[in-house]
Image (cartoon, rainbow, N blue to C red):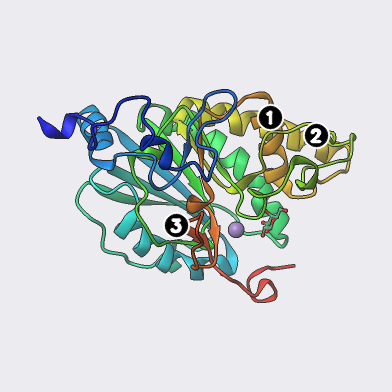
Amino acid sequence: MLAHSRNCDMPLYSPSFLEGRKDVVTVTPWLAPVVWEGTFDKDLLDTIYKPKNITVAMTVFAVGKYVQFLKDFLESAESYFMLGYRVHYYVFTDQPEAVPMVTLGSDRRLTKVKIPGSNRWQEITLGRMERIENFIETQLINQADYIFCLDVDTKFYGHWGAETLSRTVAAVHFGFFTRSRDAFTYERRPESQAYIPYGEGDYYYGGAMIAGLVEEVYKVTKTCRMWLEIDKVNSIEAVWQEESHLNKYFLYNKPTKLLSPEYLWHGTYHTDVVKIVRFTQVWKDVSKVRPN
Ligand code: GAL
Ligand code: MN
């Protein structure tokens, strides 16, 4: 069957292969792939993953005025996210009645999970790790294989499929993929559990996307939740909240796959390097959506 072979027959060494994506890093020094357009064969990946009959969970938090982002988020996910796979969305919200009716494809479901609101956006974002941890422990561990934890103030614009599946997956932040490590906005105060000294670090990962096997993401959220608690006791809040802790986690527990900024972009324009925008943060007037 043709679909089980590489689309293009090329030896491991050939000058024309070297003309592929030599403009970007496609493998980390610990041999994790970095997913860019032009580095994977979508149809071949589907022949591997579809027979596995996997269930993909996706968590998204829509608290307070952030419910306004749900419609575009969900509709665009229905157009691009893991099409052809069993997908179960879990929408964590303080306003279940405000979750829009979005027509879902076959084998796709949505469950609303009621959570309290908050007067501080930092509380909402900091509480996500603990909620995901508890949710995995009490429900998801036996119900899903992979999980994607995504920000709601985002929208899909392009294919996002099985090339994003792996044990632990991090997305390289759009703001830092051309910068060297000392420019990264890691937490730099040693008093915080998220502390990363200058001279250390691999990449700067965005907090808007965490993914992987359910049991692996469980470890991510549990560890970050514990660090967040310690910081709270010490009255320190990491500079970019859970994103800072996530970067610390992935420094010591290397992700097995990295998503290029195609998967976490800002705006809809593309560049010579980011040839396709798959998922992007939506511009927002923070004074209109945040409670503080
Ligand atoms: C910004 C982004 C923030 C945070 C920050 C890190 O571009 O909007 O959410 O990730 O970068 O420096
Ligand atoms: Mn966001």
The residue that disc 3 covers is 275
Q: Indicate the position of residue 134 as horizontal and vertical percent values.
A: 55, 34
Q: Nearer the viewer, residue 131 or 211?
A: 211
Above/below status of 150 relative to 221:
below
Above/below status of 219 relative to 154:
above
Measuring 54% from the left and 51% from the top, which residue is drawn there? Answer: 261
Classify mark 3: residues with Cα within 10 Å, few (<14), some (14-19) or many (20+): few
Above/below status of 223 relative to 161:
above
Say which element carries label 1. Answer: helix
Distance (Cα) linking label 3 and label 2: 32 Å
Contact, CB < 8 Å: mark 3 with mark 1?
Answer: no
Say which element carries label 3. Answer: loop
Measuring 31% from the left and 36% from the top, which residue is drawn there? Answer: 55
Looking at marks 3 and 2 on the same chain, the residue that comes earlier in the sequence is marked by 2
Displayed-image quarter of ligand 2: bottom right
Instruction: Return the mark for residue 196.
Output: 2
Q: Is residue 252 left or right of residue 55?
A: right
Inspect the image, locate mark 3, and give the three-letter code of the amino acid beneath it.
Answer: Lys
Classify mark 2: residues with Cα within 10 Å, few (<14), some (14-19) or many (20+): many
Distance (Cα) linking label 2 and label 1: 9 Å
Inspect the image, locate mark 2, and give the three-letter code of the amino acid beneath it.
Answer: Ile
Looking at marks 3 and 1 on the same chain, the residue that comes earlier in the sequence is marked by 1
